[in-house]
Each structure stands twice: as structure tokens, then as C-alpha cells.
Amino acid sequence: MNWLDICALEEINVLGSRIIGGPKGDIAIFRTSDDEVFALDDRCPHKGGPLSQGLIYGKRVACPLHNWQIELESGVAVAPDVGCAHKHEAKVENGRVLLALKVAATECA
Amino acid sequence: MKKLKLVMIGNGMAGVRTLEELLKLAPDLYDITVFGAEPHPNYNRILLSPVLAGEQTFEEIVLNDLNWYAENNIQLMLNRKVVDINRKKRVVIADDGSTAEYDRLLIATGSNPFILPIPGNKLQGVIGYRDVADTQTMIDTAKTHSHAVVIGGGLLGLEAANGLKLRGMDVTVVHLADWLLERQLDRTAGKLLQSALEDRGIHFRLNEQTEELMDNGEGRVCAVQFKGGDVIPADLVVMAAGIRPNTELAEKAGIPCNRGILVNDTMQTYDPRVYSIGECANHRGIAYGLVAPLFEQAKVCANHLAQLGFARYQGSVTSTKLKVTGIDLFSAGDFMGSDGTETITLSDPIGGVYKKLVVKDDILVGACLYGDTADGGWYFRQVKENANISEIRDHLMFGENALGDVGHQGQSSTANMPDSMEVCGCNGVCKGTIVKAIQENGLFSVDEVKKHTKAASSCGSCAGLVEQILISTVGGAADVKPKSEKAICGCSEMNHGQIRAAIRERHLTSMTDTMAALSWSTPNGCATCRPALNYYLISTWPGEAKDDPQSRLINERAHANIQKDGTYSVVPRMWGGVTNPSELRRIADVADKYNVPMVKVTGGQRIDLLGIKKEDLPAVWKELDMASGHAYGKSIRTVKTCVGSEFCRFGTQNSTQLGIELEHDLFNMWSPHKVKLAVSGCPRNCAEAGIKDVGIIGVDSGFEMYIGGNGGIKTEVAEFFVKVKTAEEVREYNGAFLQLYREEAFYLERTVHYMQRVGMEHIKKAVLEDADNRKALNARLQFALSFEQDPWKERIETPQLKKEFDRISVVQVEEATV
């Protein structure tokens, strides 16, 4: 796993997110109230809404366009909606946010 | 920790609903065991009639299949009747000898059909109408025999009669009272119903008592003999003369019963470990036989089983609907009327329409509809909300006639809609899709329908139609609570009013404190409750409560409107709709520099720059050098004005100037929903003040003020509020009214809906009649606004806030792919 130093944890608001440009479009990095971080492609599986702009609660984000609920841990949409946002590995170490990009078509159909 | 043991006796709708609610609140608290006397998982008992009529199959009415029990680790003991409860040892014993220990016991044994104590009532072919087995007996008998008698002309009896008739039997209904459904309908409606059913070939014997059921010599019923001596043939007799709470087991265990197992407002019996809900429970003297109240009981019971301990059941207003296809009748509340009530009646016996509304002290207390029940849900809501109807009394009878104003071809009744017709114009959902989702997934509330079908989940203008479809599909089981009674969201049991009161009374000033103090079930709420809580906090405790940007939806966080492609639109403020050449030059320059794909004039007399990237927003604001237009917020939006007396030859007042002043008065004001104003300088009303939250029309002698107008989803004409002499007074009354709205309305409630809920009288009392209060309201508004500043300016000047708009730039991303 090739971890990439992104920014300090403080650079992301609690229950907030930041965007980083990836090779295949934007990636959203989310911070939960427990200071966990998650990274998903910044595109809702529904109509491509920027998930980074959604409201974050627990380990989910609500898409800003049509309120689809997406699980941060897996990128999977909460039922009854069906779909999946591509997920990347992210973690916090020594107060720094680390990201490892994953090639698509692993867990998302 | 070892789990507690919960045993439920009875596997019906009320009991299983309690388990569902419990699993939502405390999924891991109990090991659950369920005893069911029937061999089936939980099914929708209300829909047995459509099964009998051949319109649905049994598989279609199953609510929780066996997988559901398995997935939730519920041990299901089907085909086993509990015969004893040992309360000392806390164990229940079933007829096959199996036992189960409990820490908490839930008795949900439902009811039994009342079997008349007459000779022959034990003969073969004499049944009640209660479960799948009874239904199957009727279906089978209809294949081999021809004469059926139904005893009892209530809902169940008529549904049975209709089903048997459709299955080819010759059916007679025997009824003790003067007219059918005497507990649901008045005489006129009852007679209309009777003739409609007679047209279908069903026979009736009213005012009649059954004396004896006669034996054919082989132990099977062959005829019915009445008190008067008449005898009619009968191969099948269905007893539908009422139900009796099934309390046999509880009584045997020594739990106090009196026409039902006695329970308190927490659904607890006299034994604190034992709860009871559903048709077997007697709450404040009433054993409910309809599903909607039982679901309310289920919620309360689950709350206590989950050891939360604060919900109370305080009884229900009920409504009924007959599930006989093609016959529409609906009744709710006190539809018979009594001392001190007035009735409004519409009667068209030839057209087959009859409507009766019962009013007491300007409040609708009951409704009885026959033939046209489209407005049933709406009337039911009025009854439940205790809404004051004095101002709509003259057109109350015609229902919520403007329902379905735009986007669905003006259709206001779902009854005649074909399945292929579009109900939700935003998401393209047809009636048939909604009905199918309701039936297949066992949905009972509009919220559930929204989740499964997306209908009514965008603009919400079709919510009324969806509610009607729900009511016509599941009848009285539909959960159609008004917003004022509904829990705010899945995170809490409390409704908006309770939450507002708690924040005020307990001086809660932060999101975390509020969620902790009010026992939120989620760590940080959800996208529904957090924006509402944030508004309640900052509007109740200005200066003390800190605004939480992460609890605002994106538009209010970015101070711009998100578009479908993720870009934003920017609408700078033009006070009162007035601009000047230098502002226009700056707008043009920005549009050029940032390649703005569209520049558009808005409905509120502003200019909209569409298609701006989020990271460009702060720079755009800076270069515009204009104030935020708040076109994105639940906040003051715009004050639209006409030219007024300065230029217009008809103008009587300087409407432009007043509009500018009002807009400055309210600048930066957050509110429960968006707030729009308009000021016209003469009665020609070019600023369209009649469809604004506050509309002002200048006349020669002063200003007329109108409130509660709305030009959006459903056009609402503003109501006359007051006439004043000076512009100063307009500003004072306007500030006081909007502060009242800010303090009392629920989040996402427009002024019109707030007004409908609290009544115009209440607003007049607070603002017009009490000068001190008016001043106090204005002072509180000024105080709240003193903490606010132009959000655009704030973000240009504060680097910490500007961060929200920046992207993280990392050069090496390209190579970092695994």
C-alpha cells in the first residue's frame, strides 16, 4: 500500500470533508466525530452529486443533491437505494491524514 | 452482559410492530421468543378481505416473512398456543409442553370473534371472521355450497358478505340495528351504502335477531331462524357481530382484566414485568380494534421495553374505511355529533354522494363521507390537529380543493386515477408503482412510501396525493400523523414542538448538549434533525448558541446554491431590487472573468450568476463587492418592489424606499424556512404582494399588510393582517410578525403552514393587540440580528472560514496509485 500524506487532521473540520484531485476525478475525504477518516470518489452513485458537500453523521454522508445516504466505510448506498461510490483507503497517523488510492472495479460493480 | 429475555404471546400486527420498533431502539437488549397460535408468520390481517374477494393472495399480505425473524434472531414458535403463565417463576407454557422464561412479557393475544350464544352455534359451517383459516373456509365453502348468512352489518361483516358474493354465493346480511355500520356512519350514509350493496345482489335483514341455527341432520348448519319466525337457508354462517378482547390467558394468570387487559399509559399491566398491547388491551376503558392506534401503542410499548421510559400513550382518534372495491366511505372522530356540536351536510342521493362534517367550538371533531372520500385524509388530519376552522368554514365542505396545484394536471382525487398516471412529477413515479410498493413492502406511512418509491421526496407537492393512495390502499391502518405530532426523525421520539420547548426551558445551547439531554439515539443525528436543531438553537439563544456550519446543508454552508453539476450559483443582494451602473459593470466583469455560462434575472428581482466553481466563490464575492443575497438560505430572501410614487403616475406610496428599508431591517435573518416580501405602491399590486410571506400594498391612506402568502409548490393567497398609516408602523409590525414566526414555527414550516397551525387569531393577539409584546418581539429580533454579519464578507476576511472553499493540492497523486 502506497500511503500518501494529504494534510493535517485539523485541516478537515469535524463532521466535514475536503476534496483532493485524483487521477480519475475528485476524491472526498471525510472526518467523523470520532476523528476517523474515510475516502470516497466524490460522485454519488445516483446522479453524480459531490458527496464531499453532503452532511455527515455517524459513518454516513447524505448526498447534497437528492439526499441519498452513503456508508462512508464501504461507499454503499443505504437501502432501499442501490449503488456504490468507489472507496479508497484512508487513515490517521500522528495527526496526519494518509490516503492510498485504489484502482476502481474492486468492491464496486 | 447477559441479554434480557423477552417473550411475546401472539404473533399479530400490533405485537410484531412493537418488536420492530424495539429493534430500532435497542437491537441487542433482548433475546426474543414469539409464540403464535397460527401456523403463519405475521400477516396484514386488515387485508384478509381483499384475499377473500380474490383481489390479493395470502403471500401478498405477509408483512414479516420467516427470514425476518431469523435475521433478527427471534425464536419463532408457530402453531403453539400458550396455555399458562407462571408469574412467580416467570415462565410461559405452551400447549405442546414447550416453555420459555422471561424477564419481560408482552401479551398481544388480540381478540376473538363474538359467537352469539344461540342454539346451533357449534355446528359445522358456523365460523367467525378472524384469520387465514376462516378466510380459507369461506373460500372453500363457496366452491361447494350456495347459501351464506352473515350475522352483523359492521365493517367486517360487510367485507365478508361482499367477498362471499364475489365468490358466487347467495348472501344475506342480518343486522340488529336500523342501518348498516351504525358505529361508523349516520343513518343517511348507512342507507346509501345499503342500496349500493343491494345493487350488487346482497340481501339485508335489518332490525332482525337470530333465534337459532338449524342442523341438517349431519351436524352441519342448513338454515337460520329469526325471532319473528322466518327461516332462510344457510350452508355457511359467518359471525361478525363484534370482537371480544382475548384475555383468557391473562385472567388465568391473575392479571387484572375488565373487557381487556388493563394497562396504563406505558402499556404496562398491573404486573410491572408484563406489558400488553393491541386488541386485547384495555387503555382508559377502550380496547381499540383498528390498526392505527395499535401502532401508536406499539411505539410507546417499545420505548419502555427499550428502557427509555418517556413515551406515553394517551388514546387515539380513529378513522375507518370500508375495503369493498368500488364503494367509498370514510368516517373519523365524532361523526354522529352530540350536544354543542353543529353539522354541515352535503347530500346528493341521486349522485350517490353524502358528506357530513361535525364542528364543535370552531374545531372539526368528526367527518362522515360517502361516495366521495378523496378528502378523508385531509379531514382526518384537521380532526387530529384540533385545527381552528372558523376561517375556512365556508369552503371546508369542498375539501382541500387546491390540492395537487401544479405538476399533476390539477388532479385532486386518486380514486379515479389509472395506475399509469404520474403522481410525483419530480421523480416520475406513477400511481401503480406506489400501490405496488405499499403492498409488497407493507408500508403504512408517507415517509416509508417516500423512501421506497421517491414519490413526494423532492418538492413534496404530491404528498397529499400519496397520502390518499396510502389511505385507499391500507385503509385505517395508514399512519397519517401531522408534522406537529410526528417525531422529528428516526433519531428521536420527540416532535418539533417538544424539542423547541425543551431547548428553551432547559436552556440548551449546543448540539451536543441537546442530543445528550434529549436522549438522541444516534451519535450525531442525521441530515434531517441536525439542520432543524441548529436553527432552534441559534434562534432561541442568539449570542449564546454557536452556529454549527457542519449541521447546515450545503447551500447554507457554501452561501451559494449547488447546481446539478456541483457548481454553484451566486446571487448578490440588490436592496429592494434596485441596482446601478457600477454594480452592473462589476457583475459583467465577474461574468467575463470567470466564464459564467449563464446570467439570469430571478423571480425576486435579482441577477443570478450560474455555474461558478466552489473554489472561485470567495474571489467572485470579493470582486462583486456586493452583499450576500441569501438566495440559498432558510432566511430572508428578497423584498420585491414596484416603482412606486417616485416615478409611477399611479403610485400612492414610495414602495421602493420602503422595500429597501425592510430589506435592511431583516438582513442576515435566519428563519424556519425562506421568507419573501413584496411592497407595491398602489392596489394594482405590480410587486405581486398577495403571494408573499409578508406583502404590503400602499394605498392613499396608508399601507395594507398581508401575511402567509406563497407562490411556490401550492399557491396560497396571503391573508389580510392589518392596515397602518405610516411606513414606520409597517416596519414595526413586520418585524414583530416575523420574530413570532421565528420563535414559534417548526423548521421547514412556511409562514402559511405556521399560520394554519396556530391560527390567525393567535398572531393578531401577539402582534396587533399587544403593543408591548410587539415592541418586545422587535427588540428580540434586533438582538438576534446584532450577532449576524454578511456571510460573504466574513468568509473573504477570515482565512479559517475561507478554508472550506479550498481544495487540497498534492502534486504526487498521479503516481500514488497502487
Image (tube, grey):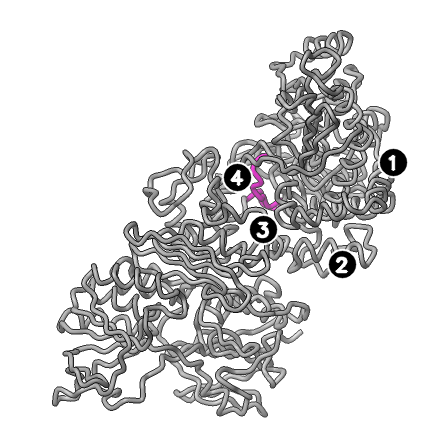
Which chain letter goes with mark 1?
B
User: Disc 1 or disc 2, which is closer to the eye?
Assistant: 1
Please state which of residues B607 and B380 is positioned toward the viewer in this rendering.
Answer: B380
Q: Is residue B355 left or right of residue B689?
A: left
In three-dimensional space, the C-alpha distance between marks 2 and 4, rounded to whole angstroms, equals 40 Å
Amino acid bearing label 2: Ala
Judged by depth in the image, the label closer to the viewer, 3 or 4, is 3
Report the residue marked by disc 2. B516
What residue is disc 3 on?
B390
Query: Residue at 74% across / 20% down in the picture?
Result: B653
Residue B303 lies in quadrant: bottom right
Q: What's drawn in magenta, residue-wise?
A: A65-76
Q: Are marks 4 and 1 in contact (CB under 8 Å)?
A: no
* Residue B809 visible from this viewpoint: no
Residue that mark 4 sits on: A106
Tag in front: 2 or 3: 3
The residue tagged 1 is: B786
Residue B685 placement (x, y as % from top left): 63, 23
Q: Residue at x 71, y 34 (%)?
A: B556
Q: Residue furthest front?
A: B701
Label 2 CA crowd tier, 10 Å (few <14, some 14–19, many 20+)? few
Q: Which quadrant of the structure image shows residue B671?
A: top right
Given the image, on which type of amino acid does mark 1 rest? Ser
Where in the figure is residue B493, as x and y percent of width and height? 64, 60
Is residue B666 visible in the rendered structure shown here? yes
Measure how far apart labels 4 and 1 are at the Cα level. 53 Å
